[in-house]
């Protein structure tokens, strides 16, 4: 029974922070992809104006 209580405490202490970190990482990754596309598009526009 003590093992079960310890396991529940570990999940309670670390589960929520891990969930929050994963959620923020996924959101940040999507924003990075959008930023990358914008930078590539900007580079293409600059190259087009130089020609």
Image (tube, helix red, strand yellow):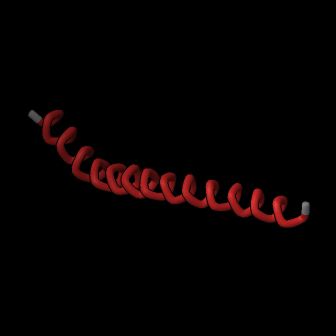
Front residue of this view, candidates 47 and 21: 47
Foreground residue among 48 and 25: 48
Looking at the image, residue 1 sits to the left or right of residue 7; the answer is: left
Q: Quadrant of the N terminus?
A: top left
Q: Position of residue 44 (x, y in %)?
A: 76, 57
Say above or below: 33 vs 46.
Answer: above
Q: Residue 47 in the image: x percent, y percent?
A: 84, 59
Which one is in front, 46 or 26? Answer: 46
Q: Position of residue 39 (x, y in %)?
A: 69, 60
Is 14 or 42 nearer to us in this picture? 42
Q: Is residue 42 left or right of residue 10?
A: right
Q: Quadrant of residue 8?
A: top left
Residue at the extreme front of the image, as rendered: 51
Identify the residue at the far right of this view: 51
Identify the residue at image location x=26%, y=45%.
10
Q: Position of residue 32 (x, y in %)?
A: 57, 56
Q: Quadrant of residue 4?
A: top left
Residue 41 in the image: above or below residue 18: below
Q: Left of 16 or right of it: where is 48?
A: right
Please report the residue visible at 82 percent of the width from the left and 60 percent of the height from the top: 48
Rendered residue at 48%/54% (across/down)? 30
Total numbered labels placed on residues in the image: 0
Q: Residue visible at 17% across and 33% down?
A: 3
Q: Quadrant of residue 51?
A: bottom right
């Amino acid at each position: 029974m003590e093992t079960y209580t310890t396991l529940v405490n570990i999940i309670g202490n670390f589960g929520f922070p891990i969930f929050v970190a994963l959620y923020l990482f996924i959101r940040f990754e999507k924003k990075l992809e959008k930023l990358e596309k914008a930078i590539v598009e900007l580079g293409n526009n600059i190259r087009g104006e130089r020609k």
